[in-house]
Image (cartoon, grey):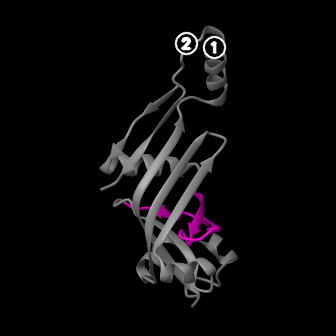
Amino acid sequence: METTEDLMGKEAIDKIAKLLDNNKLAMMATKLDSMPFSVCPMTTQEIDSNGKLWFFTGKDSEHYRELQKDKRLHLTYANQDDQEYLSIYGRAKITENRQKIDELWSSFLEVWFSGKDDPNLALLCVTIEDAYYWDQKHNKAVTIFKMAKSAITGEKSDTNDQGTLNIK
């Protein structure tokens, strides 16, 4: 059985931040008007206090070119170990804000860029327009037990939360 809990404002931002604590890897879809979508993995650098998501991107990437034409995107996060899932629709803004680059930079990014002064480096800031989550309430063992008990007794068991996340 699922519990629906829709969250707004700071509660929604806090929930997204909590879900991103265990999984920063998103699959980002662009070209939402065409089939198939264009999809690539992206690592979330931060969710800021205003609920904006930040990513580093290369100016030579396909998704960079696509977002120049159409700012809409879809991000999906899946943490299978903890049964946490997040779906986000939003709008992208590309920036080269030096202060933000300095703030978010880590040496890990040197796998893709030749340093924070790489001319190919840009930031992608996503404003969330719509978000939905599914979050397992209990660890796997408890969930499996509750599901088995429910199957045997016929009683419904409350195993996860889900709901919309509105940061506005």
Q: Which disc, if any, is residue 149?
A: 1
Secondary structure, mark 2, is loop
Where residue 15 appears, as percent x and y from the top left, is 43, 46
What's the magenta region? 24-48
Q: Which disc, if any, is residue 105?
A: none
Of mark 2 and mark 1, the one earlier in the sequence is 1
Most extreme residue toward the top is 153
Secondary structure, mark 1, is helix
Q: What is the quadrant of residue 30 in the picture? A: bottom right
Which tag is nearer the camera, tag 2 or tag 1? 2
Total labels: the figure holds 2
Q: Is residue 106 left or right of residue 94?
A: right
Mark 2, other Cα within 10 Å: few <14 / some 14–19 / many ≥20:
few
Above or below 79: residue 106: below
Please identify the quadrant where the C terminus is shown: bottom left
- The amino acid type of the residue labelled 1 equals Lys
Q: Is disc 2 in contact with disc 1, using a CB cutoff of under 8 Å?
A: yes
Where residue 41 appears, as percent x and y from the top left, is 64, 65
Q: CA distance from mark 2 to mark 1?
A: 8 Å
Q: Would residue 43 be counted in the magenta stretch?
A: yes
Q: Is residue 99 left or right of residue 2?
A: left
Query: Label 2, on which residue?
Result: 155
- The amino acid type of the residue labelled 2 equals Glu
Q: Nearer the viewer, residue 68 or 32?
A: 32
Where residue 55 appears, as percent x and y from the top left, is 52, 70
